[in-house]
């Protein structure tokens, strides 16, 4: 396999949905900044009004951070160790383009995080985007081009990459 055909982790997106603004959202942002080692979380806002949940359109309801490069790999390794206790991911967690995601129910499962009754427990969603070199040519603004089908990451390739790189079994 050539260097252009080798998959890599392009980015990792960490999302914490709180459902309300205020102190809980600030706590979630602080936890995320601590877990992602300094990556500044940005707020996510409600797209629609949901009266049953007391959410208005435009209200901040969560936060997210995008990690790239070495920070992304380090965080993903730590998150996979936390999530995959039995070193197993399921095939349904991978999409057709090779990306995969999983959720962690408690932030206290991460090493170095202790339970604080003042803060509470927060869960998070983690999405990893797997790409090959050269895929940027399809997204760039200047001289945008179609890419060869060999540069698309298939679901099976992504599963193989996760197994080889992180030692996680995919069932």
Image (cartoon, rainbow, N blue to C red):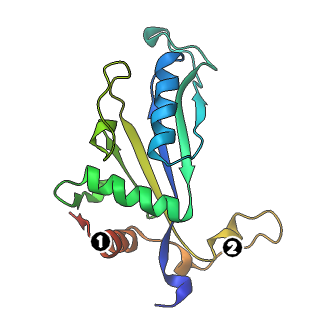
* Image point (43%, 64%), residue name: 98
Q: Residues within 10 Å of mark 1 (few under 14, many from 20)?
A: some
| Farthest residue, direction bottom | 2
Answer left or right for 83 relative to 44: left
| Farthest residue, direction left | 86
Estimate the x, y position of residue 156 in percent, counting from the top left: 35, 72
Task: State the quadrant of the C terminus.
Answer: bottom left
Q: Is residue 68 visible?
A: yes
**In this view of the protein, which residue sits in the foreground, 142 or 60?**
60
Tag 2 secondary structure:
loop
Q: Is residue 10 visible?
A: no
Answer left or right for 84 relative to 95: left
* Image point (28%, 56%), residue name: 81
Q: Residues within 10 Å of mark 2 (few under 14, many from 20)?
A: few
Q: Note whether 52 is above or below 38 in the view shown.
A: above
Q: Write down the residue under mark 2.
A: 146
- Residue 147 numbered tag: none
Estimate the x, y position of residue 24 in percent, counting from the top left: 46, 20
Residue 16 lies in what quarter of the image?
top left
* Image point (50%, 49%), residue name: 37
* Image point (48%, 75%), residue name: 7
Q: Note whether 106 is above or below 87 in the view shown.
A: above
**In this view of the protein, which residue sits in the foreground, 170 or 28?**
28
Tag 1 secondary structure:
helix
Answer left or right for 24 relative to 140: left
Say whether disc 2 or disc 1 marks the residue closer to the N-terminus: 2
Q: Note whether 161 is above or below 64 in the view shown.
A: below
- Residue 163 numbered tag: 1
Mark 2–mark 1 Cα distance, whole angstroms, equals 29 Å
Mark 2 or 1: the one toward you: 1
Estimate the x, y position of residue 29 in percent, counting from the top left: 52, 32
């Amino acid at each position: 396999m050539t260097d252009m055909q080798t998959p890599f982790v392009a980015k990792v997106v960490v999302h914490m949905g709180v459902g309300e603004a205020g102190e809980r959202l600030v706590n979630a942002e602080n936890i995320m900044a601590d877990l992602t080692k300094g990556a500044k979380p940005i707020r996510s806002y409600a797209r629609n009004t949901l009266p049953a949940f007391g959410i208005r359109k435009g209200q901040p309801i969560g936060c997210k951070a995008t990690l790239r490069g070495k920070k992304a790999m380090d965080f993903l390794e730590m998150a996979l160790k936390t999530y995959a206790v039995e070193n197993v991911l399921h095939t349904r967690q991978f999409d057709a383009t090779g990306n995969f995601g999983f959720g962690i129910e408690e932030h206290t499962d991460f090493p170095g995080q202790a339970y604080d009754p003042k803060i509470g427990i927060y869960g998070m969603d983690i999405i990893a985007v797997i790409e090959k070199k050269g895929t940027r040519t399809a997204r760039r603004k200047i001289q945008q081009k179609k890419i060869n089908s060999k540069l698309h990451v298939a679901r099976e390739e992504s599963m193989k990459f996760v197994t080889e790189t992180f030692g996680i079994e995919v069932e």
